[in-house]
Amino acid sequence: MRRDFLQIFNQFGLKEKEARVYMACLPHTGGLHTHEITTLTKISRSTVDVTVERLLERRFLRRVKSGARYKFFAEVPDTILQRQQKTMDDFAELAPFLLKGSGDFAATEILSFEGKQGLQKAYDDIFLRLKHTQTKEKELIEFTNGVGVLALYPDIEQQFVKKRIAMKVSYRGIAPTSANKVKTFDNKKEGLREIKFIDDTLFPFKSVISIYVDSVMIFSPHKPVGGCVIRNPHIADSLRALFNLVWSGR
């Protein structure tokens, strides 16, 4: 095998014999039996058996039963590349969490944003933090204006709600009574959503405060549209406690 090929396979974590078995299977779109792989690679049968199992675990090969025996098929390079790219993308999402550190000495992070595009990035942050949280239950809670958010995001069902439901993130919101005209502000079970309304005269709320994991997002959906994300678990827990107090009606 060419040395440059072998170096590339080494970067994927494959040893020389594993690379040789994969390369032997690749051009045979109809699959190969184990004894055929042994003949083509001139590697001993016992070593081929072990190597094939490792390649199956690494998802470089797949097997299909053919009669009483199995045939082995090489995954096409494009599939392996896409899988590797997804792994890299997932790690890229995780990297900011690794860099920030944890514990009492982790710095408070404040991210400001402006306009609708900035708000979209803030919502992306919500999904990212919820995706990687280690808590068993994933929940987003909000003090919200409702009407102003809908005016800014008429397609909020597609942009935000469906994604939240797909991630199995439950939602609780406290809003002025005027927000009950918003379609997505109902208590349907399939929406993983609970809303409580407070009379507008008692709760003339014009902004949004979102509390999730270790962060708080505060923004105005009215011009000038903008706000900030505060990353601090103590602040998030304190506002979560305030929300739960109001929610309980005590």
Image (cartoon, helix red, strand yellow):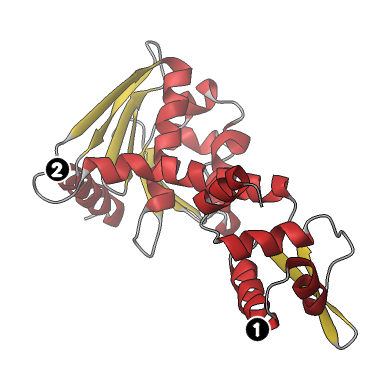
Residue located farthest toward the top when viewing the structure as drawn: 224
- Residue 47 falls in which quadrant of the image? bottom right
Identified at 50% across, 49% down, the residue is 11
- Secondary element at tag 2: loop
In this view, 103 is above or below 30? above
Q: Is residue 239 left or right of residue 165?
A: left
Q: Is residue 196 left or right of residue 12?
A: left
Please state, as top left, top right, bottom left or bottom right, where the C terminus lies in the image: bottom left
In this view, 116 is above or below 44? above
- Foreground: disc 1 or disc 2: 1
Identified at 9% across, 49% down, the residue is 104
- Residue 66 falls in which quadrant of the image? bottom right
Amino acid of disc 1: Ser
Mark earlier in primary sequence (1, 2): 1
**How dense is the environment of label 1, judged by Cα within 10 Å: few (below 14), some, or many (20 and up)?**
few
Q: Name the residue under label 1.
A: 46
**Residue 192: percent from left, percent from top:** 52, 55
Work out whether residue 11 or residue 109 is closer to the camera in this orientation and state it: 11
Task: Give the CA distance from mark 1 to mark 2.
Answer: 52 Å
Q: Is residue 52 left or right of residue 124?
A: right
Q: Name the residue under label 2.
A: 106
Amino acid of disc 2: Ala
